[in-house]
Every structure is written in C-alpha cells, then in structure tokens.
Image: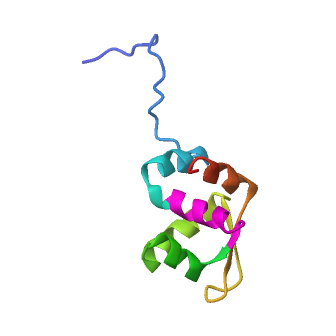
Amino acid sequence: MTANDTNRVESDNSDSRTTEGLESLSTHDTRYGRIVAETRAVGGTTTRRDLLARTELTSKVLEERLRELADQEYLELIGDSEHELIVLTHRGEGLAERYR
C-alpha cells in the first residue's frame, strides 16, 4: 500500500498530445525534419514527387508524415494527391529552422 504524496513535483516526462507533442516527436524521428527542411530548401513549396526524391522516404512513410505534419499545421496540402502542392506554414518554418 502506498500513500499519496501531495508534495511531489510534477514530472516533465508526461506524454502530452498537444501540438508541442509533434515538436518533441520530431527530434526523435528525423523523417519529419527531412520533410520540412527539404520543403524549406526549395522555397517553402514543393510536390510529393520532389519530396520522395529528395528525402528518399518510401511513398507510404512520406504520406503518413505529411498527413501528421498537416494535421499539426506545419504544412498545407493543396490539391489532389497526384498534383498536390506541399506548402510550409509559418509554424513549419519554425520547425525547419531546428534542422538547419
């Protein structure tokens, strides 16, 4: 049996699902960094085909990471999947800066 310790300091290791969660995740998964850095390197707008070539990710992995980045408002995906533009948002610029 354990007693509740009310003097305990809150842990910084909590598993947050806020938008900062992706920033934390991205430091461990360099694929996010490759995507935003490569998008930024070509002026902030690119295509899926170009990212496939520049990042050397598989189509499936790229698709998953793009959706996650878009959901967290780091990227905007404009158009249909065959002619889709990938645009780095202001927030994505900040994330890309971490990978310079």
Task: Find out whether residue 42 is within the magenta segment.
Answer: yes
Q: Position of residue 73 (x, y in %)?
A: 68, 59
Quadrant position of the N terminus in the picture: top left
How is the rendered protein coloured? Answer: rainbow
Where are the magenta residues, as a range?
32-45
x 62%, y 54%: residue: 96
81 in relation to 91, above or below: below
Considering every residue shown, the one lying at the far left of the view is 1
x 73%, y 60%: residue: 89
Residue 63 in view here:
no
x 44%, y 73%: residue: 56
73 in relation to 52, above or below: above
Q: Position of residue 92 (x, y in %)?
A: 67, 56
- Compared across the picture, whether 91 is left or right of 11 comes to right
Report the front residue among 83 and 72: 83
- Compared across the picture, whether 32 is left or right of 41 comes to left
Task: Find out whether residue 26 is within the magenta segment.
Answer: no
Q: Position of residue 26 (x, y in %)?
A: 50, 51
Magenta portion: prevailing SS class: helix
Report the front residue among 64 and 17: 64
Q: Position of residue 53 (x, y in %)?
A: 50, 78
Residue 64 in view here:
yes
Considering every residue shown, the one lying at the far right of the view is 90
x 56%, y 47%: residue: 23
Considering every residue shown, the one lying at the far bottom of the view is 82
How many badges with numbers are in the image?
0
Report the front residue among 11 and 7: 11
